[in-house]
Every structure is written in C-alpha cells, then in structure tokens.
Image: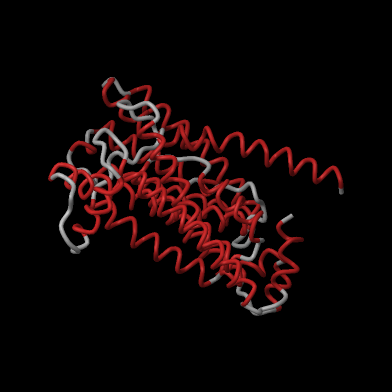
Amino acid sequence: MLRSSVRKHSGSLAASPVIRRLFSGAAVIGLLLIIASLIALSTGPVAITPTDTLSALFEWAGFGDSSASRTQQAVIENIRIPRLLLALGAGAGLGVAGATMQGLFRNPLADPGIIGVSAGGALGAVIAISTGFATTSALFLPAFAFVGAAGATALVFAVGIMAGGRSSMASLLLAGVAISSFLGAITSAVILLTSDLQAQRQMLFWLAGSLEGARWESVRIVLPITLAGLAVVVAFARDLNLLLIGEDEARSLGVRVGAVRALLLAAGALLTGTAVAFIGTVAFVGLIVPHSIRLVIGPDHRALLPLSALGGGLFLLIADTLARNLAEPIEIRVGIITALFGAPFFLFLLIKNRSRADSL
C-alpha cells in the first residue's frame, strides 16, 4: 500500500507541494499544541487560571512580573513545564520512530518497538527496580532502561544479520518478534520472583508508562537526543521515499540501501529507547500518529517526518493531561490512556486494510 501510494509522489523533486503540505500541517498542529499546552499547564491538583499561567510563563521567560502566587509559579516552573517538555520530546521521538519503521518495513501497521527496543527497555527498568539501583539516583532507572533498549536492539541486529544478511528486513522483523517475546518472558519472571511488593508495584506502574517523574534533568537529556535523531532521519527522507518504491530503483538513483537502512533503524531505535527510558512503555503513539498524518498529507517523508514529530508530541501531551485530570486526585497511567485510544484505531486500520485488499 505504501509502495504504490508513494510512487506518484517521489518521482518529482519539486519541493513546493511538499512545503505547502508541511507548513499547512505545522500550522494546524502548532495551534493545537499551543491550546493543549495552556490547558496542560493550567490544570491539575493546583488549579491555575489561564491568565495566571500565561503571566507565570512570561515571568519565567524574563518578561514582566507574574500575577500567579509563588506556589503556583513554582508548580509551573518545576513540575508542569518539565512534564510538558518531556511529553513533547518523548512523543515526538515515538512519532518519528513510528514513521521511520513504517517506511522501512513498508507496512503502515509497524510500531517503533518492532525491533525489540521497548522490550529491552522494560527489562532494564525492572532489573533496576528489583536490584534497588532505582532508589540510588533518579537517573539510574532511565539509564538501565536505555542500556536494556540498546542491548536488545544490538541483539536483534546481530541475529537478523546472521539469519538473513545485512539487508534482509524480513529476518530483522522475525528476530525482533522472537527476542521481544523472550525479553518479555524474562521481565515477567523478574516481576513474579521479586518478593518486595512495593518494588513489584513500582515495576507495574513503570510498565504502564507515566510522565510523573519528569524533571529538568530528564528534559535536558531527552530533547537534545530527540532533535538529533529527528535531524538524522529527516536528512534521509528522500532516500526513505525511494526505498518505499523498491530497492533496485533506489540503488539505481544512488541510494546505498544497506547503509541507509542501518542508519535509519539505529536512529529509530535511539529515539524509541530514549522515550522508553524516561516515560516507560507507552504504546500506539508511534503507530496511530504517523498513519493518521499520512492519510491527510500523503506518504512523502519530507513532510511526514516533521509532522509526525509535532503530532506525536501533541498526542502524548493530550494523553498525559487526560491521565492527570480524569480521575483526580488519582493519576491514571498515560500508557493506559494511549492504549484506550490506540487499540480501537489499530482495529479500525486492520479492518480498513482488509477491506481494501478484498476489493483489489
């Protein structure tokens, strides 16, 4: 489906239609981001009016004095702004990783965790919690999760190359499925064998995904990595378009297929691993966001990738705002919110693709 739809877009290198779609989409999503951000910063256990929120933001930026109280100012600066920026950064990373994986595997139903990144991150996190390292420093848990994600990705690459060669995406996919299942079984075993009930509870909470641990330290790590990964992937957007058409055509137009695939897979794994390390396993962001945007603006990755970043950040921010406020004072895990929206959408895609296949 992706292959046939992209053929008519990638033949011409004229940038004007792509630029129009990119700026139109960015304007719409940008406006929604401003509205969603104001709501996210104003709502929560400490109620703050939008006017006080805006004045607090201006004071934080160094313009004028705030009409908000000192408590409200502290809540916005130390809790809500880092949480908002972490949601935007992690959501953008997952959205871009999803668009990249869907393009590389030529499958609109591909997910960023398809090569074992999420499973490795989950295992690293539960090991950090079960061994007590997570209580030593706030950065130990994400560090363990990131190492687990990177190790799982490297293992999938190694097995995939041994099984089918450097350019075999089918072998890589099968290796990812097998290793994800294996790591998932180990994760379950670690949880069941942990005698500390409080640690078990923390593991289950982490696996459900959350941004409640957002701190400025987290933002300073996630945002630069996300921006770097996005820059790398966008730089190879044209090559990704050509890979959708076919390997032989891509090679004939100068694309180094093996190297480009490896680089894009590594960038997607880095983006996913970073998000998983700091917010846990949050499903469906990288599935429904790029697919929804593709349905609106088309399959050209020169527009699809940047808009998937904006859309991923918007989707995760909205999900986190709902998670904080739907059952206040109890906070629902953000992974539950994304699954409640993502699972029905995923079923819709399956039914739609089946209907389209039957009509051909």
Which residue is drawn at the image coordinates 39% and 32% (left, top)? 333
Which residue is drawn at the image coordinates 30% and 26% (left, top)? 329
Q: Residue most toward the left?
A: 70
Residue 16 occupies quadrant: bottom right
Residue 271 occupies quadrant: bottom left
Where residue 181 appears, as percent x and y from the top left, is 53, 36
Residue 211 occupies quadrant: top left
Where residue 244 appears, as percent x and y from the top left, is 68, 63
Q: Is residue 51 above or below residue 242?
A: above
Nearer the observer, 46 or 227: 46
Tell me if 92 is positioned left or right of 197 in this view: right
Tell me if 132 is positioned left or right of 354 in this view: left
Which residue is drawn at the image coordinates 29% and 57% (left, top)? 221
Nearer the observer, 3 or 37: 37
Q: Is residue 167 above or below residue 88?
A: below
Question: Count of labels shown?
Answer: 0
**Which colour assignment does the render follow?**
secondary structure
Which residue is drawn at the image coordinates 37% and 44% (left, top)? 39
Nearer the observer, 157 or 79: 79
Where residue 357 appears, as percent x and y from the top left, is 81, 45
Image quadrant occupied by the N terminus: bottom right
Tell me if 197 is positioned left or right of 7 in this view: left
Where residue 5 appears, as percent x and y from the top left, is 74, 61
Q: Residue most toward the right?
A: 360
